[in-house]
Image (cartoon, rainbow, N blue to C red):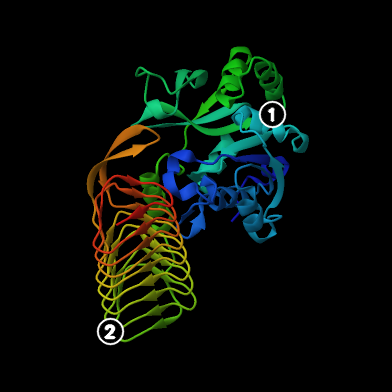
Amino acid sequence: MLRVGYESGAARMKAVILAAGEGARMGPFTASEPKVMIPVGNRPILEYVVQALVDNGVQDVVLVVGYRRERILSHFQEGKAFGARIRYVTQTKQLGTAHAVAEARPHLEDRFVVLNGSNMVDARFVGDLIEQAKGPAVVITQSDRPRQYGVVTLQGSRVVSITEKPTQMISNLINTGAYALDASIFTDIERLAAEGKNDLPSAINAHAASQDVLALRTEGMWIDALYPWDLLRLNQAAIASTADVRAGTIESNVTIRGRVAVGDGCTIRSGAYLQGPLSLGAGCEIGPNAVLLPSTSLGRNVRIGALTTVANSILMDDVSLGASSVVQDSVIGSGVSAKAGLMAASGPADVKIEDEWHAVPQIGALLGEDAEFGSGVTIESGSIVNERTRVASGARIRGTVPAGGVVL
């Protein structure tokens, strides 16, 4: 729904969405998908960004694509199905965010907004950016891990500087990567590019030296996913207000509590227990006496065996879990198949991503696409099994298994 009072400004506004990167810190989940296309709540992250713009009357969208761009183009096409008019610009070399915006310049006129396609935002977030930004602006927020972001130094409500990933604590105010800009930013982008600086925060710093750049705060939703376990937070937000839908075949003696969206062609067998919020894609089959617990999303054609329990997890398309399995706080890529008795219980773990260790307070397993597991496999908390791995029955997995690996 178009927000009241936005018609005139939004009708002239265009949006640039940055969606060219791979998202290497997402581990096994970007092997064949760009980060922006990872599904949460059974929709790609990028779709929430497009929807938030359209809800505010911003229909002209420039998508800057690169890694696995065909995945994005085939899903969104010209944007008509989403109420948008989408143009695509390919960033053949991911030199930086300012370079990406510069690639979109031929499709921009004066005022425009810039959003990151891998951040989940809602209509209020985008609406506040459009409504409050009368000139150049950056949306800021507080973070409990500011050193992972650009930390913003303020003078009143004006941006003084953005310091990328500072080694020392400056503050907990960070740059969300959402901007309102106009054509004047390209002067700074071009000058800095000649110096080898292609990131948008550097251009904003230069801009702030010559004119006021407003720091905006919003009550809207902004959730970033830096690492695979962050996807669970996005998924929880995505399905928190899911619609209550009963499609497919629901046999007798099935218990459903809370809001549960059951997709077309699903079959839920007798004795199953479903506690929402849950989202089940089309064609799923839930076996007898299986248990699905809150904040779980199942993609299309997922098979859950009898007596299996799944809690607070993302199972992408065509996943198959055998009988008597337990999956908690896990992310499972498309095409994963496991025979009976898979154990992926949740707990605290130290997880290594790109040669850096992270203490994660609660995490199950992270399983890449098309991995196969025999019967009775146990996966310790925080373990990463990369794509196309083969794991023999009775194996116990700890740590990281490389792509295409074989575990006996």
Specify the amino acid type for callout 1.
Asp
Which is more N-terminal, label 1 or label 2? Answer: 1
Q: In which image quadrant can residue 342 be found?
A: bottom left
Q: Which residue does the image show at 71% across and 45% down from the upper left?
A: 88
Of the 4 image quadrants, the one containing the C terminus is: bottom left
Of the 4 image quadrants, the one containing the N terminus is: bottom right
Tell me: 88 left or right of 230: right
Considering the numbered disc 2 on the image, is that residue within a helix, a strand or a loop? loop
Specify the amino acid type for callout 2.
Asn
In terms of depth relative to the viewer, which is nearer, 11 or 406? 406
- Label 2 crowd bin: few (<14), some (14–19), many (20+), radius 10 Å: few
Q: Which residue is mark 2?
A: 253
- Label 1 crowd bin: few (<14), some (14–19), many (20+), radius 10 Å: some
Where 279 sits versus 130, above or below?
below
Tell me: 262 left or right of 111: left
Q: Total number of numbered labels?
A: 2
Residue 280 % position (x, y): 42, 68
Mark 2 to mark 1: distance in Å? 59 Å
Q: Which residue does the image show at 65% across and 57% down from the upper left?
A: 74
Q: Which residue is mark 1?
A: 182
Viewer can see residue 225: no
Q: Which residue does the image show at 30% across and 61% down from the upper left?
A: 392
View extreme (bottom): residue: 252
Viewer can see residue 367: yes
Considering the numbered disc 1 on the image, is that residue within a helix, a strand or a loop? loop
In terms of depth relative to the viewer, which is nearer, 236 or 69? 69
Tell me: 363 left or right of 200: left
Residue 201 % position (x, y): 55, 24
Residue 111 % position (x, y): 70, 33
Mark 2 or 1: the one toward you: 2
Residue 121 numbered mark, or none: none
